Image (cartoon, rainbow, N blue to C red):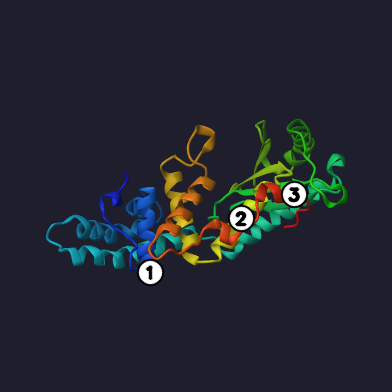
Amino acid sequence: MQLTINLLSLPVECSGDTGTSSVLVGGLLLGGLAAGTLAYMYAPELMKATGDLRRKFFDDSYDDSDKWCANSTLEPILEEILEVLKPKQKDLATRDQVINELRRVVETVQSLRGAAVEPFGSFVSNLFTKWGDVDISINLPKEGGYISYVESDRKQRLLVDLQNPLRGRWQMVQLIPARVPILKCQSSDNIFSCDISIDNLKGQMKSKLFLWISEIDGRFRDMILLVKEWAKAHDINDPNSGTINSYSLSLLVIFHFQTCEPAIFPPLKDIYAGNVADDLQGNFHL
C-alpha cells in the first residue's frame, strides 16, 4: 500500500518566503517527492495528518488561503520524518568503529603498508541517514606529497589483496570490477555496507565541497535526506541499474536552492573559486 500526495500539481514557489516549509515544499516539487509516501513508510502514525493535508490541498471547500496554510501542516510531518532519517550519536560511533577496524586490517596487508584509510561521501558531508552506506578510500603513500595516477588494474589487484583478510571479519565481501573498482562489504551487524576504493581523491574533494555547502544553510541537509529516501523508495537511486545516483540528486537540490527568490545559495564558483580537476594534479590535503 502506498499513500501519496501529488505535490507536482501544486503551484508552490519560494518567492518572498524562504521559511523552512516553503523551501522544502519547493524542493519536493523539484524531485516529485510525495510526502505521504514517506509518512506511510517511516511514520504510520502520521497517516491522519497526511490525510488532512490532502484534503486541504485538493478539497474545493478550502479557499486559497487555507491551501497555502497547509504548509504549516506539512512542516511537522517533514520534521517527524527527518527525526527518523537522521543518524543518532550511536550511528556515528558505529561507523567510526568500522573505519578504525578497517585501518587495523589494512595495516596487515603487505601491499597496502603505509596507506591511509579515509572516509568520504555522505558520511563526511554529514548528508547520510542512519542506515546510509559508508564510502572509504584507501589512499596510497604519495612520493613527495604529490598525487600520482594509479591504473585501474592495479587498484583491482590491491582490493583483491584486501578481500581475504576482510572475509574473516565482515560479511558479503564482494569485488565489483568497474571503471572505479570497489570492494563492497556488509558490516557485521548488517545495518549498513561499506564501499572501499583506492585513491578516490576526487570523491573526497566532492565530499568536502558538499560539507562546506551544507554548512551554509541547515535546510540543505534536510532536503538531501528527504529526496534521497524518496528516490530509494521509488527505485530510482541506483546507478548500477541506470537510475540517478545520490550525487546527481544533490546537484538538483543545490540548483533549487540557487534558484529560489531570494536565492539561498550563491553560484558554486563563489564557494570554491579553484578548478578541482587542476587542483588535484598537485599537492592535496584534506
> 154 above or below 282?
above
Counting from the top left corner in percent of width and height, residue 202 is at 67, 47
The single residue placed furthest to the left in the displayed view is 61
Task: Give the secondary structure at mark 1.
Answer: loop
Which residue: 48% across, 48% down?
249
N-term mark: 1 or 2? 1
Residue bearing the label numbered 1:
19
Distance between the Cα atoms at labels 3 and 1? Answer: 42 Å
- Which residue is disc 2 drawn over? 123
Which residue position is annotated with label 3?
102
Q: At 79% across and 46% down in the image, what residue appears?
A: 147
Quadrant for residue 42, please give it.
bottom left
Is residue 112 shown above or below 7?
above
Front of the two marks 3 and 2:
2
**Upstream in the sequence, badge 3 or badge 2?**
3
Between 279 and 163, the residue placed more toward the observer is 279
Front label number (3 vs 1): 1
Q: Which mark is residue 70?
A: none
